[in-house]
Image (cartoon, grey):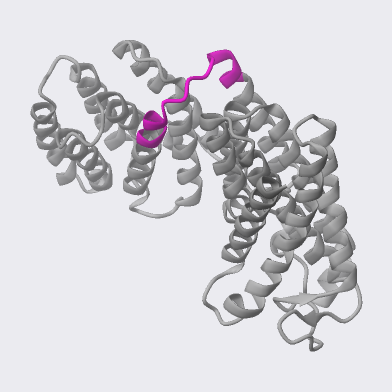
Amino acid sequence: MTKPLGLVLASALTLVFISLAPLLQPAWLLSCLLILFSLVLFLIRDTRYVSLSIITLAALYGLGWLSMFVFTCTLGIVVIGELAFRLARGEPASYLYHLVAAIGVSFAVMLYLGYSAPLVVVMGVVVAVLLRAVLRGRDDALMIEALGVAMTMFLFEEINFEVDLAILAVAAIIAFGFGYTSYRFRVADISGLFSGAMIGIILIVFADVRWFLIMLTFFIIGAGATRYRYGDKEMLGVAQEHGGVRGYFNVFANGLVATAAAILYGVTGHAAFVALFMGSVASAAADTTASEIGVTGKTPYLITTLQPVPRGTNGGVTLRGEVAAVIASAIVAVTAWLMGVADPWMVVVTVIAGFIGTNVDSLVGATLENSGRIGNSGTNLAATFVGGVSGMVLYLLG
């Protein structure tokens, strides 16, 4: 673990070179100087990984793979954010310090360079804090964080999606407010808070708040289904671990396809991506409900052989679970229709897509997951992908 004194030195070096970036050109010259100074940090045992992180970013900038904006922002977010994180004590205060410091330095860089890209900044900051939560305890966490933030900012800079700062601020408040509430009520852990916030911001910015509310509908359905007869499921040994608290794996497995759909819709405006979004969310809701409620029903049957199997077996299906899946899909579909996101045909398509998705989950669970080739999150991702694509194809054929 890097001591604050070493990080103070690294932070001072970071601020100096951020200031020099627009003045010292070409890029390779500043890169070489920063690498030389960073080697001094490398000689100090407690700042080696900080040094390697800075050297990596400097090399990418010197090679022309990162713009000046992405390079300087990433440098500030990672190093200054880490210093703030170490100065705070306890969770979630340390993450709040990291978040505030990273936002402050990155917006300062944006103003200093005269470059307006608030969405790029916010995505970089959220990814930084998320990776800090996921990688806590690893010596190489800063290096991975630096690369993750740089890649994220590079991607969103390339997308070049313009968003009003007020809308972005409202999106961040709503998404983080929901994430923190989930964390406080032990529905999500700290990684689930930040991963959920990231997805929420993207949904609101690239689509609108209604898409976020539809995703929230799934979240409420899933949380309710998880809590349903939880004591009985614990006695049977089939209850969700950690009291049903969701982490980043579960959030991304169920929300990654929907997030991609929102970005594609924001860039193209094509209705097919609304159907992709609806199908993936319905599949996530249907699968979670079928698993959590179906396990309380009668003997499940393996979807590939129709032979009875113990409760909790991957790929086991019950009539109660299948009915619950259809109801969950219908709730998502009708909610979208009431909000004006889905037309009547898309409502039908969404219910069908949700049913397809949950049974694909069972099929993948009975084959690939039971054989140990993929985990539960991989199974969920496959189900939401197939459900989403099914919804999109059916909508286009209608």
**x and y, in percent, of residue 201 in the image:** 59, 31
Residue 140 in sight from this viewpoint: yes
- Residue at 61 percent of width and 79 percent of height: 367
Residue 167 is drawn in which quadrant?
A: top right
Q: Main secondary structure of the magenta part?
A: helix
In the displayed structure image, the side of residue 375 where residue 293 appears, left or right? right
Instruction: Tell me where the magenta segment starts and ends, as one range.
Output: 154-169
Question: Does residue 298 lie above or below 332 as drawn?
Answer: below
In the displayed structure image, the side of residue 97 where residue 53 appears, left or right? left
Question: Does residue 166 lie above or below 146 as drawn?
Answer: above
Q: How many numbered discs? A: 0
Foreground of the two, 113 or 341 = 341
**x and y, in percent, of residue 219 in the image:** 75, 46
State yes or no: residue 158 in magenta.
yes
In the displayed structure image, the side of residue 90 where residue 26 appears, left or right? left
- Residue at 91 percent of width and 78 percent of height: 298
Residue 91 in sight from this viewpoint: no
**x and y, in percent, of residue 255 in the image:** 62, 48
State yes or no: residue 262 in magenta.
no
Foreground of the two, 297 or 181 = 297
**x and y, in percent, of residue 378 in the image:** 56, 64
Residue 225 is drawn in which quadrant?
A: bottom right
Question: Does residue 114 lie above or below 203 as drawn?
Answer: above
In the displayed structure image, the side of residue 366 where residue 14 appears, left or right? left
- Residue at 38 percent of width and 29 percent of height: 157
Foreground of the two, 356 or 3 = 356
